[in-house]
Amino acid sequence: MAQEEIKVYGYRWIMLSAYMLIVAVNQMLWITFAPITSEATTYYHASDLQIGMLSMCFMIVFIVVSIPASWIIDKYGMRVGVGTGAILTGIFGLLRGFAGTNYTILLIAQIGIAIGQPFLVNAITKLAARWFPIEERATASGLGTLAMYVGVLAGMIVTPYLVLGHGIAPTLYFFGIISIVSAVAFLIFVKERPPTPPCLAGQDERALVFDGFMHTLRTRDFRWLMLIFFIGLGVFNAVTTWIENILGPRGFSAAQAGMTGGLMIAGGILGALVIPLLSDHYKKRTPFIIIAIAGATIGLAGITFTHSYAVLLLSGACMGFFLLSSGPIGFQYAAEITYPASEGTSNGLLFMVGQISGIAMIFAMDIFKSTADGSMTNPLIILITGLILCFILSFKLRESRLLRE
């Protein structure tokens, strides 16, 4: 009878769509310079490291801003929290178009966009909890996470073609117009919450920010999940960063490495659609986390050892499908097991540990690669071992009590 009293609103899909658009644009702005490094070094008279910093600054800024952003989202809500991220993305996305060949202005603009990132991505499960019933929340989180992958893939594919046809400056103007339009669209359509909560009475209550933070860290299953995210997200960031260097010593070309990286993202997009839907359908979280880690481990093993291009492509798609699909399920699972802590708190902590490990693993892989031929097989074996550890730890996770209820 209690279930019949729960009312959901069709506007939740408009909210989710507006959110997905601004998140995708933010991620597209992040990855802009990764596929055009050589052109950018010439245009801005900068080194490869300086151009790499335009992307790397997002990881660094996230570590600093993540917890304050989660606090603002929890304290002041979606309109202020996510709205801040949208405004920063729009303004600084447009500023890049006016930077000309001035690298300093460009870097300032990238940092501004990077500050906006945690205000956006840390709110994925907050939006799902505010607007969606619990049996749809993994799906909503999956679609929100999917927007991140779509933005990255669009930036990787679209940017080189635009730069080749029109140049860097017009490309950045075009992206700037998209960013400001997306920000305005979000601010127009955003609503703080539906007229009635999409859950049973009392389940929409949340702990105070500091109390929720301490409760989250004291939760046994969340601590295990945080360790799993520390390894898993770090592995993904490191492998995607060094994909060309990983494959080059085995005779694969830059184009083949790029195709493998693209298939990883494409596989992740498909996985973020399929796996969360199954998780909601069967009302289970932990079995799908276990399956995702197992599949990602197999995919990484293929990337590490194969000399066959066909197997390489299959391995890249496999790793992306399983590893990236585990993200939205993990975020939703964290929100459920740490209730009544706010969703932004658990979301932000998981993203933050992933950024910390990503930076550490990126530098570690470069340090420990073979000095003879540049092979990264030994560091990759360590990453595979880390995923195997994640697989073992995932059996310690207990099913979500909130979902069972």
Image: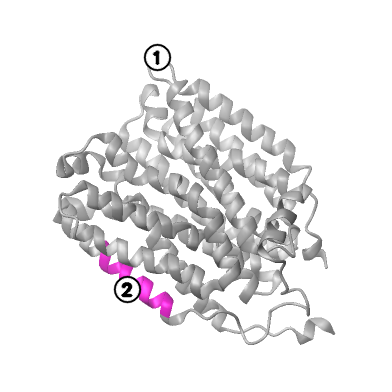
Secondary structure mainly formed by the magenta segment: helix
Residue appearing at x 50%, y 79% in the figure = 14
Residue appearing at x 31%, y 34% in the figure = 254
In the rendered image, residue 40 lying in the magenta stretch gets the answer no
Q: Which residue is mark 1?
A: 371
Q: Is residue 405 visible?
A: yes
Q: Secondary structure at mark 1?
A: loop
Using a 10 Å C-alpha cutoff, classify the residue at mark 1 as few (fewer than 14 neighbours), some (14 to 19) or many (20 or more): few
- Going by the image, does 400 lie left or right of 228? right
On screen, residue 172 above or below 188:
above
On screen, residue 398 above or below 5:
above
Residue appearing at x 75%, y 56% in the figure = 215
In the rendered image, residue 179 lying in the magenta stretch gets the answer yes
- Most foreground residue, 73 or 40: 73
CA–CA distance between discs 2 and 1?
A: 48 Å
Residue appearing at x 35%, y 57% in the figure = 112
On screen, residue 126 above or below 399:
below
Q: Residue furthest top?
A: 372
- Most foreground residue, 48 or 373: 48
The percent position of residue 50, horizontal first and vertical second, equals 28, 38
Q: Give the magenta-colored segment's residue range.
A: 175-187
The percent position of residue 76, horizontal first and vertical second, equals 56, 72
- Asked which quadrant contains residue 284, the reply is bottom right
Residue type beneath disc 2: Val
- Most foreground residue, 158 or 29: 29
Residue type beneath disc 1: Thr
Where residue 181 is drawn, which disc sits there? 2
Q: Give the position of the C terminus as an image quadrant.
A: bottom right
Name the colour scheme.
one colour
Q: Give the position of the N terminus as an image quadrant.
A: bottom right
Does the CB distance between marks 2 and 1 fall below 8 Å? no
